[in-house]
Image: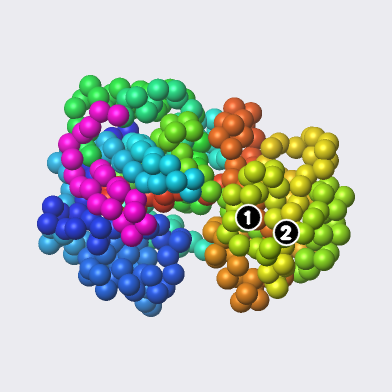
Amino acid sequence: MPFRALRYGPNHDLSLVTAPPYDVLSDAERRKLLSLHHHSIVAIDLPVGDHPYEQAAATLAAWRDRGVLQLDDRPSFTLYRMSFVDARGERRNTVGVIGALEVVDEGADGVLPHERTTPKATTDRLDLTRATRTNMSPVWGLSLREQLTDALIAAGEPLGEFTDEHGVTHRVERVVDPLRVRSIASLVSSAPVLIADGHHRYAIARTYRDEMRGTPLGDAAGTTMAYVGELVEEQLSIDAIHRLYRGITADELRRVANARFEIEPVGGGVTSRIIAEMAQRGSLCLVDDSGAGWWLTPRPDAFHSLRDLDSDRLEYALRTVSHEVAYQHGFDEVMAQLRAGHAHAAVFIRPTSITEIRRTADERLLMPPKSTFFTPKLRTGLVMRPLDA
């Protein structure tokens, strides 16, 4: 559904006031963003202090009163385009639509999870929603509806464009034409939406919906802000989320993995080149805390009952041994964790294929936790959704 969007006023530089998602920002990165502009969205989306959520709500109200943030006069969809160079060096252009997606019960068929989630004890996003009564950042959904991209290609009313520090160009456009709004709504509504990123936020939206039943916000809380793009190869860039292990040594990992993988040393040391070589070899790569590495190549028929997922293979191979696992995106970041002593060993895995993501949706399956890392990340602050608008 379209909604009345809350946006930064036209005198703001979107490159300075928007931010990456809250859950990828460190405290230092938050401080840096605020030093670049005192109206940075992190002041609301990532509040700090003794009473952070009350402060976020007060800041939001003050910015609306002063015109820093301005409410659209009528409901609309927002087209969100990104242009970037992917990990293979290819130029990509993507488009999705931001609207209000129905919040359905767990197990219902309209909105589907695609992987098991790790437990999160924090109620941070729920407390922020309660205080601000606003969806601050969108859930990322993938539509199984073919030709959705075709319906989004035509430009809308331009609202802003900038290129971020990673070379990604972000562009947002508003769609208010009633015929086009109805067409986009009909297309998205005609097929299930698979949650790509934001499972926790969607679960929070379900809790908030239940809390708001019977209140003036009940209808609005029945939907949550979501970015929806088509589940097709050309619209998605997917990286791997690698595994960090504690409670088990690299030697023990090799011993256990040997039953399912052919193991051989990595010649010449472990460098970022292994990422491309893994794809060429069809292998995973185990690294110990000294930086030594070994190729793990699945043995023929060792995983015949599993899907074509490295995350599934690792879970299956290590199911009989006690260990702790953490998740980290990026080669340099994984190696830094090993050097800092935060893990005894790591396993680099290959990105999940579009074919397996589609199969997950079609067969209503779930992947292991942290099987996919969709890039580039959506910026927070380009669009907000007040539930009381």
Q: What numbered label is drawn on residue 274?
A: 1
Where is residue 66? Give x, y as percent.
12, 62
| Label 1 close to label 2 by CB (< 8 Å) | yes
Closest to the observer: 302 or 6?
Answer: 302
Across and down, in percent, residue 159 comes to 19, 44
Which residue is the site of mark 2? 266
Q: State the CA–CA distance, disc 1 to disc 2.
A: 9 Å
Q: Which mark is drawn over residue 368?
A: none
- Of all residues shown, which one is farthest toward the front? 268
At horizontal 21% and vertical 33% (from top left) the residue drawn is 156
Task: Write down the region rendered in magenta.
Answer: 153-172
Residue 118 in view here: no
- Amino acid found under the numbered disc labelled 2: Val
Which callout, 1 or 2, points at the residue further toward the start of the chain?
A: 2
Q: Residues within 10 Å of mark 1 (few under 14, many from 20)?
A: many
Which secondary structure lies at badge 2?
Answer: loop
Picture layout, residue 313 above or below residue 166:
above
Residue at the image point whose x is 29% and y is 61% from the top: 41
**Residue 45 position within the rendered picture, expressed as x and y whole percent measured from the top left:** 35, 61
- Residue 88 lies left or right of residue 170; in this view the side is right
Can residue 238 be found in the magenta stretch?
no
